[in-house]
Amino acid sequence: MARRRGNPDRPEPAAGDEDARDALPTGRYRRAASLGRLAAGAAVREGATRVTNLGRTDAERSERMSRQQFQTAEQIVDVLGTMKGAAMKVGQVLSFMDVGLVPPEHRDEFQAKLARLRDMAPTVAFRDMRKVMEADMGQPLSAVFADVEEEPIGAASIGQVYRARLREKPRGWRTDVAAVKVQYPGIDAAVRADLQNMGLILRLAKTVVPGMDVQSVGREITERTIEELDYELEASNQRRMARLHRDHPFVLVPGVSTELSGRRVIVTEFVDGQPFDAWTTKSQEERDRLAEIVFRFYYGGVWRDGQFSADPHPGNSILLPDGRVAFLDYGLFHQISREMVENQAQAIRLCMARDGEALLRHMEAIDWVPPSAGFTPDDALALAEQLVWFAIEDEDSRLAPEDVARMIFQVGDPRSPYWAKTRRATVPAEYMMSLRLAGMAIAVCAQLDARLNYHRIVREWLMGDPPASELGRQEAAWLARRGR
């Protein structure tokens, strides 16, 4: 992408006609119109599928239903990809979990569609983004930056990122170059309009993932999305993670400037390196190492600190020249109590020990399944295995996206043989973020076609076993130096 440098105080040209794609519809009813038309079309197709399935064989019915799911998923991508705000955020979340959105026979075709969705983040003119920056900072850009590149270096669902050079290097930073993330003008109103339409959005998603708990997912998305609008909160989250990972041997959390960050602008240390797409072309050994770093950072954060970045999207990871990985974006962040950490850890320990009787008693005690559900010890093991299936056996696992697709299908699709069991579970909402994190982190490792012994890594955290890998030994030495 070509970049244009400019004097931060250079007068802006008069506003002219803008591309239609830059218009930001903020009204609830206007934004609901596209979703409503899509929902109506999905309902018509679903009804038609049920009618035309009469008299068909099981195989014919299954094939027609899978095709209908695929068509609905395609249209969801089309509509969400043209919107900004919460609808676009939902689309991005669904895009990362692409492995479970459609039946396996349509997966390759659908991935091509999702690749376009990930590039659909719109571009807003710099003159409009400049107004947001100066209003949030309360001063002209020239008072803060020696230079600002007017072409964004990145775009997301609610904002754009620019590279700028600070007049003074912040304490603790390695450079005076900053990444400046700025919210789109009017995005707050657009997001809140989307959230009012959340039920409609999730009804669409439910036609693709029938097992979705619309109410709990809706609450979770609403709470987390509102948090993501507050860049001051994100700055606090990133500062906390940078402190927790200070001097880490293979993880870097870029510094953040508290003084320059506000509700709509966040200024962080700029890092340069190889994006995730470049990782996939590396050797098996290198891919294994990178996957282990991703797994240890995201999944390990749950067990070690009880606070973690809950958005392990590949775009949030950059490989630095010194071999470390920088992790970005802390808008989606979660903290859980030590009690909740231990509850999850104990469930996994009992599952690994194959102690179904004790596991069932534990899951009832922590309200994961109600006693009235009639679970058996085998049912409890079957449910728990869906959460840690990748770490059950003490062996190298080479996961593929299809493996993650199978997990999502088994847990959330009525056609799954596990559906009768999982639909009776009542895993409390406060546990869902860490469970979702685990699935997404594993999906990243699967995209790298990594070969790892997840069992041994998990045992370090839950059983206190000595590390079995070089990265594990490096991290253990770092923790010892930190007295943790």
Image: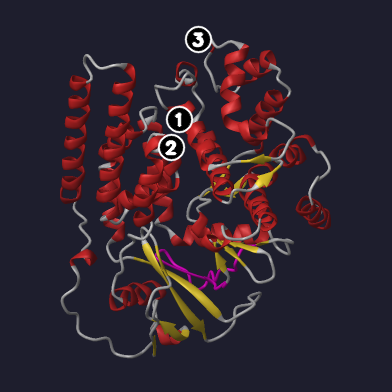
* Element at label 1: helix
**Badge 3: residue crowd in 10 Å (few <14, some 14–19, many ≥20):** few
Left or right placement of residue 190 versus residue 417 in this view: left
Quadrant housing residue 32: top left
Residue 122 lies, with reference to residue 220, above or below; the image says: below
Of residue 425 and residue 242, the one placed in the foreground of this image is 425
Q: Can I make out residue 176 in this image?
A: yes
Mark nearest the camera among 3 and 2 is 2
- Amino acid tagged 3: Ser
Q: Which residue is mark 1?
A: 409
* Element at label 2: helix
Residue 372 badge: 3
> Magenta span covers which residues?
252-272
Left or right placement of residue 379 versus residue 85 in this view: right
Choose the circle earlier in sequence order: 2 or 1: 2
Mark 2 to mark 1 CA distance (whole Å): 6 Å
Mark 1 to mark 3 CA distance (whole Å): 25 Å
